[in-house]
Image (spheres, helix red, strand yellow):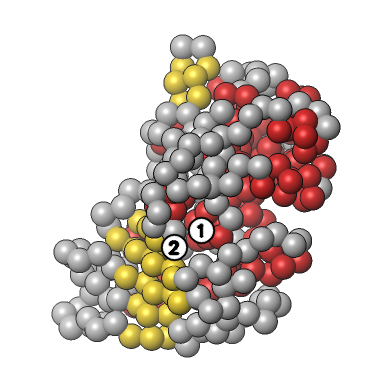
Amino acid sequence: MASTSRCAIFAASGISDRRAPGEGRQPFSLEWPSDPDDASGGARTPIALSAETGITAAQRHQFNIDFHRDLARLQTWAAKWHWPCPDVPEFRVVVSDRFKISKSLVPAWSGDAGRMEFPAWRVAARKAAIAHELVHVLFPNGNRLLAEGLAVHLQAELGGNPAFPNFGRPLHQLARERLHAMAGLGHRCLADLDSIATPAPLTLKVGDDFYGEEPRGQTHIYPIAGSFVRFLIETHGLDAFRDLYSRTPLISLQHNAGAPERWTGAYGMPLADLEMQWMSVIVRDDSAAHATLPNLNREHGHA
Ligand SMILES: [Zn+2]
């Protein structure tokens, strides 16, 4: 548990300050907010905020509340399900206009665990994927599909605000739409995604189409990763998923996506069989089928 963790929110230097001159120029501390949903009994860590960001004082305050609420929820989740939760020595959160996407897994792989980057406009809109990025810090993985799938699933399950890639929409529904748009339901893509080791991005080639790091690619691939992990946990339980997850730990500066055989070790069946089960579930799950799609270019923004 992270009960002794120190939290600090910085801003990068050289960022324009849109607030009134002199307002909030000095770092200051806020009380750890109370949250009726926090059953962890965990930390009450003061959080130091720098004022030099492109967000207002009210937006910083809200981000502070959201950050600690999601941290407490993830710690509670880990304790409930006996999920290993390291004592992160320090959260170094940077909110900046410089960032186009959120990021924390790649810094962890580089040896900078605890560094979390959020675009200022995401924080201002209260759409920052806080729980997602906290999952990367608390539960990183060497397999990029599993790392992103768990992060997307827990952001949707526990995150206090809608965020990339589904922004509150049901994950299975969105995955079905994306898969249909990419290649048609029934197309097998998980073996290719499962071969990608952190820190390489989740990319996919489907026929002549390439879904890369650009907004179109990521808004298609991330719902698929999140939906599949949600299916694994909901259908086969957390024990098997924890077993699978533990087989590809994140080791700084190493590349290890894991061998295909590990799926049979954890689930008693190969990935291809689990993929078929998952597709049958998301095809059946047609709730809210008439909801509108988010704008693909606007809603990109995460790694
Ligand atoms: Zn991520």
Label 2 crowd (10 A; few <14 / some 14-19 / many >=20): many
> What amino acid type is highlighted by mark number 2?
Gly
Q: CA distance from mark 1 to mark 2?
A: 6 Å
Please give the name of the residue rendered at 37% of the width and 72% of the height, measured from the top-left corner. 9
Q: Is 24 left, or right, of 208 in this rendering?
A: left
Do we see residue 220 in this rendering?
Answer: no
Residue 280: image x %, image y %?
79, 28
Please give the name of the residue rendered at 69% of the width and 63% of the height, measured from the top-left corner. 78
Q: Which residue is mark 2?
A: 114
> What amino acid type is highlighted by mark number 1?
Val
Tell me if residue 187 comes above or below residue 294 in the rendering: above
Which sits earlier in the primary sequence, circle 1 or circle 2?
2
Q: Quadrant of residue 16?
A: bottom left
Do we see residue 176 in this rendering?
Answer: yes
Quadrant where the N terminus is found in the figure: bottom right
Tell me if residue 94 comes above or below residue 98 in the rendering: below
Element class at badge 1:
helix
Label 2 lies in ligand 1 vicinity (Cβ under 8 Å):
no
Residue 58: image x %, image y %?
38, 77
Task: From the viewer's side, name the closer residue of 296 and 203.
Answer: 203
Residue 241: image x %, image y %?
73, 45
Tell me if residue 257 comes above or below residue 47 in the rendering: above
Please give the name of the residue rendered at 45% of the width and 48% of the height, measured from the top-left corner. 252
Residue 23: image x %, image y %?
23, 82
Q: Which residue is mark 1?
A: 137
Element class at badge 2:
loop
Task: From the viewer's side, name the closer residue of 284 and 230.
Answer: 230
Please give the name of the residue rendered at 76% of the width and 66% of the height, measured from the top-left corner. 80
Q: Are marks 1 and 2 in contact (CB under 8 Å)?
A: yes
Tell me if residue 19 comes above or below residue 182 in the rendering: below
On residue 224, the disc is none
